[in-house]
Image (spheres, helix red, strand yellow):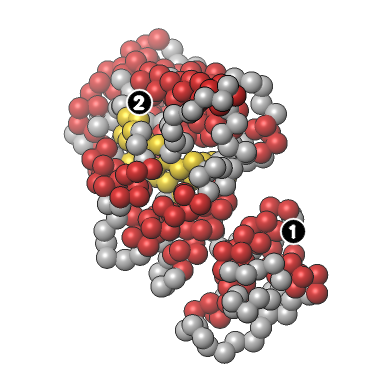
Amino acid sequence: MHSEVESRHVLVALATHPDVIAAVGHERCGDDLLLPRGSSIDPPAIPAESDALLSRCNTIDDAVSLFNELSGAKSTPVNRAEAPAGPEPSSPADPQAIADEPSGAAQAELHALIGLTSVKKQIQTLAEMHLVNAERHKLGLPTVNIGLHLVFTGNPGTGKTTVARIVARIYRELGLLSRGHLVEVQRADLVAGYVGQTAIRVKEVVNSARGGILFIDEAYALTGGGDYGDEAIATLVKMMEDQRDDLAVIVAGYHDDMETFIDSNSGLRSRFQRFIEFGDYDTDELIEIFLGMCDTHQIEAPDHLIEGLRSYVDASVESAQTGNGRFVRNLFEEMFARMSARSAADGDIEAHEITRFELDDLPPVTANRRDEPPGFARAYL
């Protein structure tokens, strides 16, 4: 192993990639990571074959990159309950499955989404600009620097993650990214509790997203707090530059908070120049989303229920800021819970009782539903 790579760096990589522990024949990682720098620790027992691979390591980044490579190339069963949790690509996770998609499938899926008219138009325009750039490049003409990185702003549950996943596939189809997967993370996935560990964690996460999109939800949480958020941002900015040819980053959150986040670092402002606002769904769109969920689960929604649902949504929006898809998902789950309780009340569950919503399945409208627990829990209060 190269003299600049300490044993602890290998252990960090192993701890970060539990799949590789068995692959390199080393079973120990944990307490040694917390020892002060320069402490004497026994070198890990590395087989000759793995030692040859480690000879390629000249820096810490090389060590982490090597184990990223190994974890992608090998599939060694591990006990996930004992492995540290980490970000995973959102489905479809298999790059080959994405690559085998018919041309235009991702854009067709985008346009099939309910609502989001402005978002769809902006993504379509962005794709067209990249297409024109590609044609200009073929003709030997100068291209316009558009950039792949985006800022999604809006309330929770307005489709930001769904659209980010589709954008990753659109970028791959346009030849802008090699894989087209999406890795979704939040602050806890990027910020560690020890000096020097945050940078390593950010690098590991960014490397896992290479060839696709790194989606950072509630990215504004990285700023402030007097901890390692600034280190995470600085490392992210550097890696975005280092991997600019095969990585896109989308950050998301409330509009004002995201403006503050982007302004917190000059590197962020220079890289994130395109904001896309996700507006709340209106009543008709919320009902359409609800009916789509009913179709998926084969539950009938009769006309009189839809009328009651419209009144319920209109009465809820003002008090609970419910104009988003998450409200509909919570409502569907709550109605399913009430339907279940209704059908099981007499001890005899019949088919017609569990394949059709009734008005009684609508929960009562309260003054402020934001103070209530989401989903199934509300049905039993």
Q: Is residue 314 at all visible to an observer of this figure?
A: yes
Residue 358: percent from left, percent from top: 41, 20
Residue 363: percent from left, percent from top: 32, 29
Nearer to us: label 1 or label 2 = 1
Label 2 SS: loop
Farthest residue, direction top:
303
Q: Residue at x 77, y 70 (%)?
A: 52
Of 109 and 203, nearer the camera is: 203
Pointers 1 and 2 in contact (CB under 8 A)? no
Q: Quadrant of residue 278?
A: top left
Q: Specify the amino acid type for callout 2.
A: Leu
Residue at which label 2 appears? 362
Q: Give the side of residue 360 with respect to residue 23, left or right.
A: left
Q: Residue at x 26, y 47 (%)?
A: 263
Of 53 and 67, nearer the camera is: 53
Label 1 SS: loop
Residue 105: percent from left, percent from top: 60, 21
Q: CA distance from mark 1 to mark 2?
A: 48 Å
- Number of numbered callouts drawn: 2
Q: Give the side of residue 349 with respect to residue 149, left or right.
A: right
Note whether 282 is above or below 44 in the view shown: above
Residue at which label 1 appears? 76
Q: Is residue 351 at all visible to an observer of this figure?
A: no
Farthest residue, direction front:
140
Note whether 64 is above or below 264 in the view shown: below
Q: Quadrant of the C terminus?
A: top left
**Disc marking residue 182:** none
